[in-house]
Image: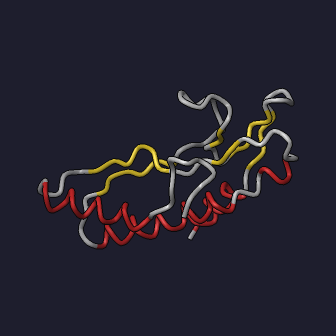
């Protein structure tokens, strides 16, 4: 599935495939996934209450974490996983035109923060 960003697609099976490949090819080294997440376009005309409804990011997180769990069950030595990213921020290639955070930053309103639906999803996932 394609996201709003042309260079970023959803292919959670690929995460498991890559991790298993690394396990087999390199004698199962410790693996830390330091950034994994989905971005969406920053549509400045969208009201905040609509912008925080980030269902694609939820699908991305759910799929990738499920396949990550499969890889761990397959014996991959995963030591850490970090979501990309906690806050919407300035991205080095795209500036403020894309959003990656699970917290919406209102750049027009004194940098007010609003949790996106994906933040609530992640909280419930972690509490399971």
Q: Residue at x 54, y 29 (%)?
A: 93
Location of residue 95 (image quadrant): top right
Looking at the picture, the colour scheme in use is secondary structure
Q: Residue at x 68, y 44 (%)?
A: 41
- What is the quadrant of the C terminus in the image? bottom right
Q: Looking at the image, how many numbered discs can be counted on the residues?
A: 0
* Towards the viewer: 42 or 120: 42
Residue 20 relative to residue 3: left or right: left
**Residue at the front extreme of this rendering:** 6
Residue 76 relative to residue 80: left or right: left
Location of residue 72 (image quadrant): bottom left
Image location (x, y in percent) of residue 113: 77, 39
Q: Residue at x 59, y 47 (%)?
A: 5
Q: Residue at x 74, y 49 (%)?
A: 115
Location of residue 127 (image quadrant): bottom right
- What is the quadrant of the N terminus in the image? bottom right
Image location (x, y in percent) of residue 16: 34, 65
In this picture, is 11 found above or below 48? below
């Amino acid at each position: 599935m394609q996201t709003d960003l042309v260079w970023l697609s959803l292919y959670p099976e690929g995460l498991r495939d890559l991790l298993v490949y690394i396990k087999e090819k390199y004698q199962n080294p410790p693996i830390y996934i330091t950034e994994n997440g989905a971005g969406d376009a920053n549509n400045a005309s969208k009201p905040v209450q609509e912008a925080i409804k980030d269902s694609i990011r939820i699908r991305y997180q759910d799929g990738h974490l499920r396949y990550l769990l499969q890889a761990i069950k397959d014996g991959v030595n995963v030591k850490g996983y970090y979501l990309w990213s906690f806050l919407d921020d300035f991205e080095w290639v795209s500036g403020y035109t894309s959003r990656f955070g699970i917290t919406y930053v209102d750049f027009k309103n004194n940098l007010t923060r609003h949790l996106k639906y994906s933040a609530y999803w992640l909280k419930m996932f972690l509490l399971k």
